[in-house]
């Protein structure tokens, strides 16, 4: 299990997740930097992500869509706000309409990724904060495999730890 | 999935309610202790009526309850309502746990 810990802040609608991987920092950086590798893990099985724009530089934009089993293609965008290879990445993300134009009425969320060298291993800390309301629900629907029973099991386990959710 | 237990309008109300900083602060406070509406109003640079409106939004989203005590209304956190928001965060957490698993799988290929 790569995930070491996760902390949810209910009032701030934010999640901080710490995972460790058996690979060096440079290698883990690639899974974010290379859109072809990113596509392999961003979407759940059966819902592949395709990045059709990936301008990986501060201020640069990425556009992507997911392909659902029903053939629908919900779209999203990222805006890279900080890139410090190979340790730090920050981006805003939100939803787009069918033409790729940002839909900002739900606000955007902000993600911060930090990679730390543990001597051959890498600790990745992800902080994701939602700005508003439906935005988070949409993100959950887009990233979630339907009928995912194992996730339900995890949720039960997490709910049994009330001290972690503030 | 757990989210199916909430109707779309429930979820909309919940996150609209939590989208505002003052309302999140009210939830934080009243989850620990009950506050009267006037007690809350004294904490913020806004009118009693404005605070009352915030409380009403939170009440509709089932995040707080109001209880009459004498001439005052005591606002308290509604544990069940907060639990709903927590479940949605839990689902998002599950998404990231699965992503981390997939990353580990990709890294293990080499």
Image: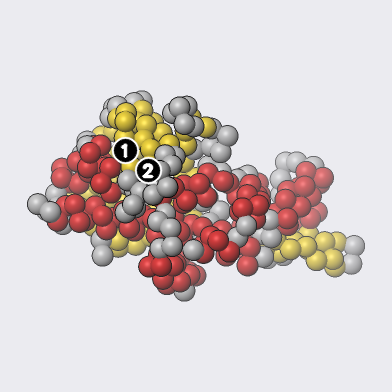
Marks 1/2: CA distance?
A: 8 Å
The chain identifier of the residue carrying mark 1 reads A
- Height in image: B104 above or below A114? below
Residue A88, position in %: x, y? 28, 40
Q: Are marks 1 and 2 in contact (CB under 8 Å)?
A: yes
Residue B105 placement, left or right of A100: left
Q: Residues within 10 Å of mark 1 (few under 14, many from 20)?
A: many
Residue at point 68% right, 56% down?
Answer: B61
SS at mark 1 in the image: strand
Residue B105, position in %: x, y? 20, 56
Q: Quadrant of residue A30?
A: top left
> Does label 1 or label 2 sit earlier along the sequence?
1
Residue annotated with mark 1? A50
Q: Quadrant of residue B73?
A: bottom right
Q: Quadrant of residue A152?
A: bottom left
Indicate which disc residue A67 carries: 2
Residue B15 or residue B109, whichever sits in front: B109
Residue at point 21% right, 56% down?
Answer: B104
Residue A80 placement, left or right of A34: right
Residue B43, position in %: x, y? 71, 49
Query: Which residue lies most toward the right here?
Result: B71
Residue at point 41% right, 71% down?
Answer: A153
| Residue A124 in sight from this viewpoint | yes
| Residue A161 in sight from this viewpoint | no
- Height in image: A74 above or below B101? above
């Amino acid at each position: 299990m790569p995930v070491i810990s996760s902390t949810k802040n209910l009032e701030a609608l934010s999640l901080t997740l710490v995972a460790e991987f058996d690979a060096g920092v440079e290698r883990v950086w690639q899974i974010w930097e290379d859109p072809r590798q990113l596509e392999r893990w961003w979407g759940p099985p059966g819902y592949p992500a395709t990045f059709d724009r990936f301008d990986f530089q501060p201020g640069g934009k990425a556009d992507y869509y997911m392909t659902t089993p029903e053939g629908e293609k919900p779209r999203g965008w990222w805006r890279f706000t900080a890139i410090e290879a190979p340790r730090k990445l920050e981006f805003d993300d939100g939803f787009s309409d069918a033409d790729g134009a940002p839909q900002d009425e739900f606000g955007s969320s902000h993600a911060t990724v930090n990679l730390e060298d543990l001597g051959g291993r890498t600790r990745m800390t992800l902080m994701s904060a939602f700005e508003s309301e439906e935005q988070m629900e949409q993100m959950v629907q887009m990233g979630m495999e339907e009928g995912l029973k194992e996730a339900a099991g995890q949720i039960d386990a997490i709910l049994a730890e009330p001290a972690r959710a503030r | 999935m757990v989210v199916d237990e909430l109707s779309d309008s429930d979820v909309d109300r919940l996150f609209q309610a939590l989208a505002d900083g003052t309302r999140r602060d009210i939830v934080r406070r009243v989850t620990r202790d009950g506050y009267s509406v006037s007690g809350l109003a004294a904490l913020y640079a806004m009118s009693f009526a404005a605070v009352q409106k915030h409380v009403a939004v939170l009440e509709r989203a089932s995040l707080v309850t109001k209880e009459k005590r004498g001439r005052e209304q005591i606002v308290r956190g509604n544990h069940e309502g907060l639990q709903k928001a927590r479940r949605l965060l839990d689902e998002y957490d599950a998404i990231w746990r699965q992503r981390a698993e997939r990353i580990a799988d990709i890294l293990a290929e080499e």
